Image (cartoon, grey):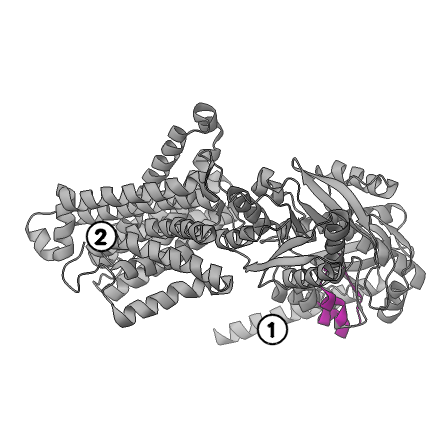
C-alpha cells in the first residue's frame, strides 16, 4: 500500500516536471507573444473585470488581424482574482512564473493592483493597470504603469466643476470611511474646493455595505448644502440618492468614476437625475476612434462600453506599441519603451506617461439624466 | 429641533425593523429555550421569495403594483418561509431532540441535488443527484445506520449555527452572491409636516410590526395552540403526558416564527431595497440583542428592545460617527447583561412566553 502511494507520488511529480518544462520551452521558441491579464470576472465588482476583459479582447483581435507584433501573434492568458487582493497576487505570480507572460495587464480596483504589483516588479515584468486611480499603485516600482489619471486629479476636477461651472458656495461631503478610494477623493475635493473659495458645510461618513443612511442625510439636510459630494461605489451611491430624495433632500450629488456602472440606474432610478460625476471618457464623444470602438464593442458584446472597457483597450494598445518600439519582449527594454509612451491616441484620450508612470490626460464630467449619461464638460490637467 | 425630531423618526423606523425580527427570535426562545440562529436566514429567504414573486411576469400582469398585490406578495412569502421553518424543524432540530426517520435521506438528498447540479447543470442531472442521495439515505436507514440520537441543549445550539451557515452559503449558490434590488411593491409617498418628512413605507413598517405583535400576543395567550405552546414551554414532558402533541406544537411555533421572519424581511426590504444572501447576519445579531434587551421570551419586550436599539444607533450616528453604529448594539448587550440580565420587561427566571 505504502509502496503504491510512493509510486503514485513519483509519477505525479514526473508528470508535473514534464508539463512545466514543456510550457516553459514553448513560450521561448514559439511564434506567439503571451501577455497576462488578471481581473474580477466574478464577485462584487464583476462588471469592472468583465468590461476590461472585453476591451482587451477587441485590442488583441485588432492587432492579430493586422499581422500581430514583431511578426508574432498575441495571446492573452486571463486569470480571475474574484476581486480579492490576495487572489490578485496569486494570479500575477502564476502568470509570470507558470505562463511566462512578458507583461501583465490589470486590475481595476486599486487595492488589488497594489497587492499584485510587487510580484511584477520583482520579476522585472512590466505591469499596466488600465484603471486603478489610487496614487500609491505606481509607487510600488518602476515597472508599474497606468493609462488613467489619479485620484487627486479627479478630486480637483469635481472641485473645479462645482466652484467654477456650477458656482456652488456650500457643499456637503459624504464619504465611505473604510475605502481608500473614497477617502482620497474626498480629502482632495475638500482641500481644492476651499482653495477656490467654497465652504464645506458638513462632512459625514458611512461604510461600504451599509443600507441605512437616514441619520447622516438628515444631518446634511439641516445644513442646507447646494450639492453633496459622494465619492463612493455605485451600490451605496444609488441607495444614498434614493434615501436622500425620500427625506426631501433635493440637492444634486457629485462623485467620481466609481459611479460608472449600469447598476447605478437599476438601483437609483430617477433619484439620481441632475447629479454629476467625473469619468475617463464619454460614450457621446464624436471622435472617430471612440465611435469606431463603440461600434465594434456593441456588435460583439451587445452593450454600450463603459469607460473601463475603453481603458482596457488602451492599456493593451499602449503595450503593443511599446513592444514594437522596443523590438523585443525583454523586461527591462520593454519597460523603457512603455515609459516613453507619448501622445498615444487612445479611446479614452491622448495618453502620455509622466515620470511617475501615470497618464496625464483630461477628465470628462457627465450628468445623469433619464437613465443616460449626458456629456457636460472636459477638464484638462493643471 | 426639527433635526432632532427627524432623527427620532429615523430611529423609530430602524427600530421597528429590528423589532420585527426580534419578535420571531423571542417567540421560539420562549417556547423551546432555543436561540434559533437560522432565524435571520429565514428572514433573508423571505425577502428573496418576495423579490421573486413580485418580479414574476404573470404575477405582475395579474396584480400590478398596488396595496392588495403587496399584501399577496407578503402572505405568499410568509407561507413559503413557514414551510421552510417546518422543514428546518423536522430535519435539523427534531433529530437533535428525539428519534426521527429519514433525516439522513433528507440531507443526502440535498447534498445529491447540489452535487448533481455541479456536475451537470441540467434539471436531469440535478434530479438524478437528488434521487441517488435519497435512495442511499433510505437504504442506509433500512440497513440500520441512523444518526446518533442524543438530547442536549448544546447540540441543538450547534445545529442551529450549522443550519444558519447552510442557508447563507446555499443562498449564495441558489440566489447568487451579488446584491439584488427589491422592487417598490407599495407606492411610496413622502408626507411633509412642518419640515419633517415621513416616508410612507416607514409608517407601514411601524404599523405592521405593532399589528403583528398584538396578533402574536393574542395567539400565544388566548388560543388553544397558544395554551399548548405555553405548556410545552413550561414543561415539555409534562405537556406530552397531558396529551399534547408536542412535536406538532413545536413545528407550529417554528412555522409562526418563520412567517414573522419573512414578513420582517419584506418590510425591511421596502425601507432598504438592497438584498443579498448575507443580509440577515448583522440585523439578525442586532435583533437578538434587541430581544435580550427587552427580556428574551417576552413579546412586547422584543418590540421595546428593538425601538430602543434603533434609537440608540441613530443617535450615535448623528452625534458621533457612523463608525460606531455596529458597536452600539453590542455595548448595549454588555450593559444589559451587567446590570439587568433579565431585560427591560423580563420577569426573572419565572416562566416566560
Q: Position of residue B64 (x, y in %)?
A: 46, 26
Q: Do callouts 2 and 1 point to residues on the same chain?
A: no
The residue shown at (44%, 23%) is B62
Side of A206 where B64 appears, left or right: left
Q: Residues within 10 Å of mark 1 (few under 14, many from 20)?
A: few
Q: Is residue A136 magenta?
A: yes
Q: Position of residue A149 (x, y in %)?
A: 78, 58
Q: Chain of mark 1?
A: A
Which marked residue is nearer to the observer: mark 2 or mark 1? 2
Task: Using the rendered image of the protein, determine whether residue B293 is visible from the camera's viewpoint.
Answer: yes
Question: Is the Cβ of the residue at disc 2 closer than 8 Å to that at disc 1?
Answer: no
From the viewer's side, name the closer residue of B168 and B78: B78
Q: Is residue A55 magenta?
A: no
Q: Residues within 10 Å of mark 2 (few under 14, many from 20)?
A: some
Q: CA distance from mark 2 to mark 1?
A: 49 Å
Q: How many marks?
A: 2
Q: Chain of mark 2?
A: B
Looking at this view, name the residue that lies furthest to the top: B62
Q: Please name the residue that numbered disc 2 is placed on.
A: B100
Q: Which residues are magenta?
A: A117-139
Q: Please name the residue that numbered disc 1 is placed on.
A: A10
Looking at this view, name the residue that lies furthest to the left: B242
Amino acid at each position: 500500500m505504502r509502496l503504491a502511494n510512493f509510486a503514485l507520488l513519483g509519477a505525479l511529480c514526473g508528470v508535473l516536471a514534464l508539463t512545466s518544462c514543456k510550457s516553459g520551452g514553448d513560450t521561448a521558441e514559439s511564434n506567439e507573444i503571451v501577455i497576462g491579464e488578471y481581473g474580477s470576472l466574478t464577485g462584487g465588482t464583476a462588471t469592472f473585470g468583465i468590461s476590461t476583459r472585453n476591451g482587451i479582447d477587441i485590442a488583441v483581435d485588432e492587432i492579430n488581424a493586422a499581422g500581430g507584433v514583431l511578426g508574432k501573434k498575441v495571446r492573452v492568458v486571463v486569470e480571475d482574482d474574484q476581486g480579492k487582493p490576495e487572489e490578485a497576487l496569486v494570479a500575477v505570480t502564476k502568470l509570470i512564473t507558470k505562463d511566462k507572460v512578458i507583461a501583465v495587464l490589470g486590475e481595476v480596483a486599486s487595492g488589488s493592483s497594489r497587492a499584485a504589483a510587487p510580484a511584477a516588479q520583482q520579476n522585472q515584468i512590466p505591469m499596466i493597470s488600465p484603471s486603478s486611480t489610487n496614487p500609491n499603485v505606481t509607487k510600488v516600482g518602476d515597472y508599474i504603469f497606468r493609462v488613467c489619471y489619479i485620484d487627486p486629479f479627479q478630486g480637483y476636477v469635481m472641485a473645479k466643476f462645482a466652484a467654477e461651472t456650477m458656482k456652488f458656495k456650500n457643499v456637503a461631503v459624504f464619504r465611505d470611511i473604510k475605502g481608500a478610494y473614497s477617502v482620497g477623493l474626498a480629502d482632495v475635493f475638500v482641500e481644492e474646493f476651499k482653495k477656490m473659495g467654497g465652504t464645506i458645510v458638513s462632512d459625514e461618513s458611512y461604510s461600504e455595505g451599509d443600507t441605512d443612511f437616514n441619520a447622516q442625510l438628515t444631518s446634511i439636510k439641516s445644513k442646507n448644502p447646494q450639492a453633496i459630494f459622494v465619492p463612493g461605489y455605485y451600490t451605496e451611491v444609488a441607495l444614498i440618492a434614493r434615501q436622500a430624495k425620500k427625506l426631501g433632500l433635493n440637492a444634486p450629488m457629485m462623485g467620481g468614476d466609481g459611479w460608472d456602472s449600469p447598476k447605478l440606474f437599476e438601483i437609483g432610478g430617477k433619484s439620481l437625475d441632475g447629479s454629476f460625476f467625473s469619468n475617463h471618457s464619454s460614450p457621446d464623444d464624436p471622435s472617430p476612434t471612440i465611435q469606431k470602438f463603440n461600434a465594434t464593442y456593441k456588435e460583439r458584446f451587445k452593450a454600450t462600453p463603459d469607460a473601463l472597457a475603453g481603458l482596457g483597450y488602451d492599456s493593451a494598445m499602449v503595450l503593443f506599441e511599446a513592444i514594437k518600439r522596443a523590438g523585443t519582449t525583454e523586461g527591462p527594454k520593454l519597460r523603457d519603451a512603455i515609459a516613453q509612451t507619448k501622445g498615444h491616441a487612445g479611446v479614452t484620450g491622448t495618453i502620455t506617461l509622466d515620470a511617475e508612470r501615470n497618464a496625464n490626460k483630461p477628465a470628462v464630467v457627465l450628468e445623469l439624466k433619464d437613465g443616460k449619461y449626458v456629456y457636460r464638460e472636459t477638464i484638462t490637467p493643471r | 429641533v426639527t433635526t432632532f425630531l427627524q432623527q427620532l423618526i429615523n430611529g423609530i423606523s430602524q427600530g421597528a425593523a429590528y423589532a420585527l425580527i426580534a419578535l420571531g427570535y423571542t417567540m421560539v426562545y420562549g417556547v423551546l429555550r432555543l436561540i434559533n440562529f437560522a432565524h435571520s436566514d429565514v428572514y433573508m429567504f423571505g425577502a428573496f421569495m418576495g423579490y421573486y414573486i413580485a418580479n414574476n411576469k404573470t404575477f405582475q400582469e395579474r396584480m400590478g403594483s398596488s396595496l392588495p398585490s403587496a399584501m399577496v406578495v407578503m402572505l405568499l412569502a410568509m407561507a413559503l418561509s413557514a414551510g421552510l421553518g417546518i422543514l428546518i424543524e423536522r430535519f435539523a432540530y427534531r433529530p437533535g431532540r428525539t428519534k426521527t426517520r429519514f433525516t439522513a435521506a433528507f440531507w443526502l438528498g440535498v447534498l445529491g441535488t447540489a452535487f448533481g447540479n455541479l456536475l451537470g447543470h441540467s434539471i436531469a442531472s440535478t434530479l438524478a443527484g437528488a434521487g441517488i442521495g435519497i435512495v442511499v439515505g433510505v437504504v442506509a436507514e433500512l440497513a440500520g445506520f441512523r444518526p446518533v440520537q442524543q438530547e442536549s441543549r448544546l447540540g441543538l445550539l450547534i445545529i442551529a449555527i450549522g443550519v444558519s451557515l447552510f442557508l447563507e452559503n446555499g443562498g449564495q449558490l441558489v440566489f447568487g452572491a451579488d446584491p439584488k434590488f427589491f422592487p417598490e411593491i407599495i407606492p411610496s409617498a413622502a408626507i411633509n409636516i412642518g419640515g419633517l418628512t415621513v416616508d410612507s413605507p416607514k409608517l407601514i413598517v411601524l404599523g405592521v410590526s405593532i399589528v403583528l405583535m398584538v396578533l402574536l400576543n393574542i395567539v400565544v395567550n388566548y388560543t388553544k395552540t397558544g395554551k399548548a405552546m405555553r405548556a410545552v414551554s413550561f414543561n415539555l414532558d409534562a405537556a406530552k403526558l397531558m396529551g399534547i402533541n408536542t412535536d406538532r406544537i413545536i413545528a407550529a411555533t417554528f412555522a409562526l416564527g418563520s412567517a414573522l421572519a419573512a414578513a420582517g424581511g419584506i418590510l425591511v426590504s421596502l425601507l432598504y431595497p438592497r438584498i443579498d444572501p448575507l443580509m440577515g447576519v448583522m440585523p439578525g445579531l442586532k435583533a437578538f440583542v434587541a430581544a435580550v434587551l427587552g427580556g428574551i421570551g417576552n413579546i412586547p419586550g422584543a418590540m421595546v428592545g428593538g425601538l430602543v436599539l434603533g434609537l440608540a444607533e441613530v443617535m450615535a450616528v448623528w452625534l458621533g460617527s457612523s463608525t460606531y453604529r455596529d458597536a452600539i448594539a453590542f455595548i448595549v448587550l454588555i450593559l444589559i447583561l451587567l446590570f439587568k440580565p433579565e431585560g427591560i420587561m423580563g420577569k426573572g427566571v419565572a416562566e416566560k412566553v
